[in-house]
């Protein structure tokens, strides 16, 4: 079911949306459907083990993005529905294990495009205004670049879908995003602020995110921000990469820096999915046993931690489909992309 008179619902948020010169008046922008992929996969996760995924490649006037609908099950029991949205076309962060930055163009999606993507998914899957649905911004893009539009989008969806709840995502280079999430959580139901973790040492992080220094990444400042904001649930998504951060010493190092946050943090220990970019940069997925060993280090230090491992790499991570389109019209490129997975 669509927003009741979307323009009316969204129009009151005009001052919250993107104030850039290219911003359009808020309203509903319907994307063009370019491609649909349906898939089912099994996972080792916290409270579900099977995912039925429908991923859409959507075209706006000058951008191709992806949005998805996930259904999660534990055995035959339905656990939750998830709408996954992107925040940009391409991503300026440039993580080498995530090929979203390989898209030839990069711009932030406007407020009305974010809403249009959500409404496209909601209508295709008959999401009712009274339904319980998780909305996560773990598609292509970096949440910290989109604070005004994320705030407006979450508030608009929450107003029209009162039982919707949300997960915001970031790689953590901007500690102020934690306080932003805490403030937003006063107005919406925030499930998690998910922070993707790679390494606490900048010299190591630069191997995966060459722009980390330019972006001002500082793990200690990030941890300080988490300690200050006690009203936001934080999930650290520890992406395990073989011979990079998969040793007991690596896990002990981050656990020591998070000491005292055992009651505040959940750690999701995720196995890297192999992609063309990860192969290019010799980033190798670890064994499942290595993932479980890292998980156990955190558990032994008193943290809530669980593994997140796909039974197979289905090539449906964010960006892998949009990367085949250079522009509207479906001209293809050899670029294949991958980023964060669905909310686990």
Image (cartoon, helix red, strand yellow):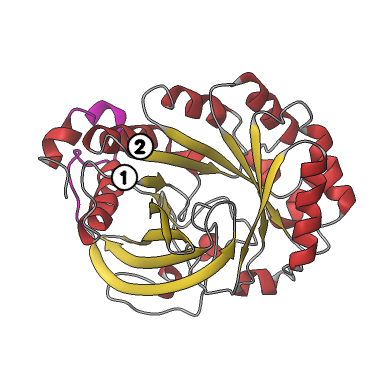
Question: Is residue 29 located in the magenta-colored stretch of the structure?
Answer: yes
The local secondary structure at tag 2 comes to: helix
Please name the residue that numbered disc 2 is placed on.
Answer: 149
**Image position of 87 (left or right of 249):** left
Residue 241 to residue 298: above or below: below
**Image position of 281 (left or right of 159):** right
Residue 11 to residue 143: above or below: above
The local secondary structure at tag 1 comes to: loop
- Percent coordinates x, y for residue 291 in the rendering: 75, 59
The residue positioned farthest toward the front in the image shown: 76
Number of the label disc, if any, that sits on residue 218: none
The residue positioned farthest toward the right in the image shown: 249
Circle 2 packing at 10 Å, graded few (<14), some (14-19), many (20+), is many
Residue nearest the viewer, comparing 23 with 28? 28
**Image position of 192 (left or right of 69):** right
> What is the C-alpha distance between the residues marked 1 and 2?
7 Å
Q: Earlier in the sequence, mark 1 or mark 2?
A: 1
Q: Residue at x 86, y 43 (%)?
A: 252
Number of the label disc, if any, that sits on residue 110: 1
Region of the chain picked out in magenta, as a range: 12-30
Q: Residue at x 31, y 45 (%)?
A: 110
Q: Residue at x 29, y 41 (%)?
A: 111
Q: Main secondary structure of the magenta part?
A: loop
- Percent coordinates x, y for residue 303 in the rendering: 73, 38
Residue 222 to residue 326: above or below: above
Q: Residue at x 59, y 56 (%)?
A: 45
Q: Are marks 1 and 2 in contact (CB under 8 Å)?
A: yes
């Amino acid at each position: 079911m669509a927003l009741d008179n979307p323009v009316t619902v969204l129009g009151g948020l005009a001052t919250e949306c993107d104030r850039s010169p290219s911003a359009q008046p808020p309203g509903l922008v319907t994307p063009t459907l370019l491609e649909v992929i349906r898939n089912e996969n099994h996972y080792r996760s916290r409270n579900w083990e099977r995912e039925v995924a429908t991923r859409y490649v959507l075209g706006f006037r000058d951008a191709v993005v992806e949005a998805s609908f996930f259904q999660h099950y534990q055995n035959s029991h339905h656990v939750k529905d998830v709408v996954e949205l992107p925040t940009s076309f391409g991503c300026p962060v440039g993580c080498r294990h995530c090929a979203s930055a390989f898209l030839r163009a990069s711009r932030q999606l406007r407020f009305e495009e974010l809403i249009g993507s959500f409404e496209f998914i909601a209508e295709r899957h008959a999401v009712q205004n009274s339904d319980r649905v998780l909305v996560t911004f773990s598609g292509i893009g970096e949440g910290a670049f989109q604070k005004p539009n994320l705030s407006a989008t979450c508030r608009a969806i929450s107003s029209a879908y009162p039982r919707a709840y949300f997960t915001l995502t970031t790689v953590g280079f901007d500690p102020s995003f934690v306080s932003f999430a805490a403030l937003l959580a006063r107005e919406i139901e925030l499930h998690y602020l998910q922070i993707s973790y790679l390494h606490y040492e900048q010299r190591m992080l630069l191997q995966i995110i060459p722009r980390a220094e330019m972006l001002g990444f500082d793990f200690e400042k990030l941890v300080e921000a988490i300690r200050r904001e006690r009203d936001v649930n934080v999930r650290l998504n520890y992406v395990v990469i073989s011979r990079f951060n998969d040793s007991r010493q690596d896990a002990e190092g981050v656990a020591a820096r998070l000491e005292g946050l055992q009651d505040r943090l959940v750690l999701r220990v995720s196995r890297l999915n192999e992609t063309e970019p990860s192969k290019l940069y010799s980033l190798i997925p670890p064994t499942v046993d290595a993932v479980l060993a890292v998980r156990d280090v955190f558990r032994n230090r008193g943290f809530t931690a669980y593994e997140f491992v796909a039974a197979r790499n289905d090539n449906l991570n964010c960006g892998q489909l949009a990367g085949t389109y250079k522009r509207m019209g479906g001209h293809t490129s050899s670029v294949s992309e991958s980023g964060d997975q669905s909310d686990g």
